[in-house]
Image (cartoon, rainbow, N blue to C red):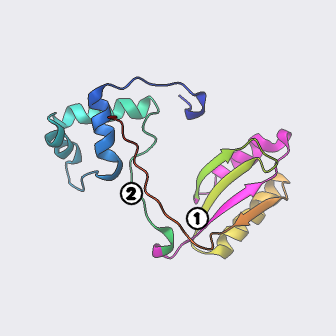
Amino acid sequence: MNWDDGEQVNLDETDRIILNQIQSDFPLDPEPYEVLGRRIGLSGEEVLTRVRRMRANGVIRRIGGNFYSNMLGYASTLCAARVPEDKVAAFVECVNQYEGVTHNYRRDHDLNIWFTFIAPSLEDIERGLAEIAAATGVQEIYNLPAVKTFKIKVDFRFDE
């Protein structure tokens, strides 16, 4: 299932409880699903089965850590590009080949492709953007590094 399809997946109360638990309080434990299971009164196997199903259905995109890239010595930026319609597919494919691209969105706007790019340095990002421009012929790619970061935490409550 593609997230952009707009299809909704029905979740039962237990699925919602699991989603509430794993968003920001995933156990750092050799047996995390057992810990989650004890918290909510299920076996670890049942929690894992449900998480796998929600992953397969596209409800869960990924499970992993979130890091502040700048604290690890990396640079990050938001990029916007003006991509002609006939080049969108090739442009997106090229951009997505870069390991440091974490998000890539199409927008209904003159600047129609937006993506985030993380790399060891701003120079590496600029080099990557130049490579993308050369490979795709798209020259209008804007590098918009943050001047100040305003980080907010968002948890989606599934039990309300």
Count of picture labels: 2
Q: Position of residue 61 (x, y in %)?
A: 46, 41
Amino acid on which disc 1 is placed: Ile
The quarter of the picture where the C terminus appears is top left
Name the residue at the front extreme.
Answer: 160
Residue occupying the point 59% across, 28% down: 5
Image side of residue 83 versus residue 25, left or right: right
Q: Which residue is mark 1?
A: 118
Distance (Cα) linking label 1 and label 2: 15 Å
Q: Position of residue 26 (x, y in %)?
A: 28, 51
Q: Position of residue 131 (x, y in %)?
A: 76, 62
What segment carries the magenta color? 71-100
Q: Nearer the viewer, residue 160 or 16?
A: 160
Q: Secondary structure at mark 2?
A: loop
Amino acid on which disc 2 is placed: Gly
Q: Is residue 85 magenta?
A: yes
Image side of residue 87 versus residue 1, left or right: right
Q: Is residue 123 above or below residue 92?
A: below
Q: Quadrant of residue 147?
A: bottom right
Q: Earlier in the sequence, mark 1 or mark 2?
A: 2
Q: Secondary structure at mark 1?
A: strand
Q: Which residue is mark 2?
A: 65
Q: Is residue 134 above or below residue 60?
A: below
Q: Quadrant of residue 76?
A: bottom right
Residue occupying the point 46% across, 67% down: 68
